[in-house]
Amino acid sequence: MKEVLKNYSGILLLLLGITVGSIIGIVAPDIVDYLKPLGDIFLNLLFVSVVPLVFFAVSNSIASLEQQSKFGKIMVTMAFTFLFFILTAAVFTICAVYLFPVSSVSGSKEMVEEAANNDSWGNRIVGFFTVGEFTQLFSRQNMLALLIFSFMTGFSARKAGEKGQAFRSFIASGYEVMKELLLLIMKVAPIGLGAYFAYQVATLGPQLFGFYAKPLGLYYIAGIVYFFVFFSLYAFMAKGQNGVKSFWTNAIYPTLTALSTCSSFATMPANLQAASKIGIPSQISNIVVPIGTTLHKNGSSMSSIIKIYVAFLIIGRNFFDPMNLLLALGITVFVSIVAGGIPNGGYIGEMLMISVYQLPQEAIPAVMIIGTLVDPLATVLNAVGQLVASMFVSRFVKV
């Protein structure tokens, strides 16, 4: 019993915090505004720490890889894994909405304000990959630019040979320090996440049973099935029966963190910790988890299909037209890449969807509200997907 408490004390405390937060959110919604600052302080500490962790983890992994060919193999295997998972999630969701169609959905009068972005597509593409100032690099708003910079730094540290030894030691040491800092911050996770969860339950809970109940019910059922069935299948393909057992034993903490924060980036430390316990080599997990958090999202893939489907229901168009389905798959892959790993980061994908299909303005509020309400489960699928993707990649690449 003592051994169980020792091994699972973190998870049990987190569950307790979330349970207490949920109860407060239901029975005393008036006080959640006073609790929210506690959750925000915790999340801010986590976000501030995750950004340097990404830099040190990625650059250190690349700098410490013994063979150039290993890095190439990791990247190719990772790219195929991400694409396979994203498309599988999208096709599964298309099958779900075909077999269990949603009826009686009409336009919503509820308005959602979203700042208009008048930048050209050229400027947006530049903004995805690069920043104009070094200081802007270390921001979670510019994670793709940070990943590219981390890659280049790791390569340069390797190419520098003996002269780069001191710098390689610095980034290796920096990685260890940032890991310890994140473990320190996670000690207060039960309080911080409990407070944030109370706010989530109080604000989003009532909307789950109104106008959006049917499409949300479909998403949550399909998402839960995908989470348990497909993630188990991926873990089995990676490491057999032991892989399934090991995955589910260690996936609890990242799952609870993702559910509480609605942020893939906030879940990254828990994922790296779980990957280490599963036995995934750090050279793989330190590349796959940070990059996957930015580029690979099973939950966003599923939610983008549901949102497109609902938008088509609202305007009375046929979602199952082959050309519309192909476009939906293309948008899904793109959304997975560009949608941020922060709460409600999928708005840019939603605006792209509206623009590609040339949907009328009345579809926008419904699509955005659904995007907000599916966020908790979508984040779980996005975040925990990095853990099973790391297992998958380690099956084919030996380091």
Image (tube, grey):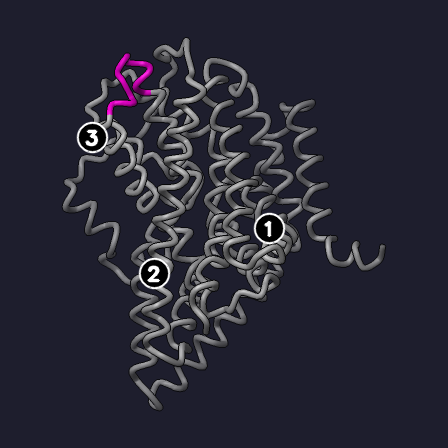
Q: Which residues are magenta?
A: 311-321
Residue at point 36% right, 79% down? 67
Q: Is residue 64 above or below residue 231?
A: below
Answer with the quarter of the image where residue 32 lies: top right
Q: Is residue 181 above or below residue 39?
A: below
User: Residue 46: where, in percent of width, then height?
Assistant: 52, 53
Q: Nearer the viewer, residue 250 or 243?
A: 243
Which residue was labeled with disc 1?
251
Tag 2 secondary structure: helix
Viewer-nearest of discs 3 and 2: 3
Q: CA distance from mark 3 to mark 2?
A: 28 Å
Dot 3 or dot 2: first in sequence order is 2
The amino acid marked with disc number 2 is Leu
The amino acid marked with disc number 1 is Ala
Q: Is residue 387 above or below residue 216?
A: below
Q: Which mark is residue 345?
A: none
Q: Are marks 1 and 3 in contact (CB under 8 Å)?
A: no
The amino acid marked with disc number 3 is Val
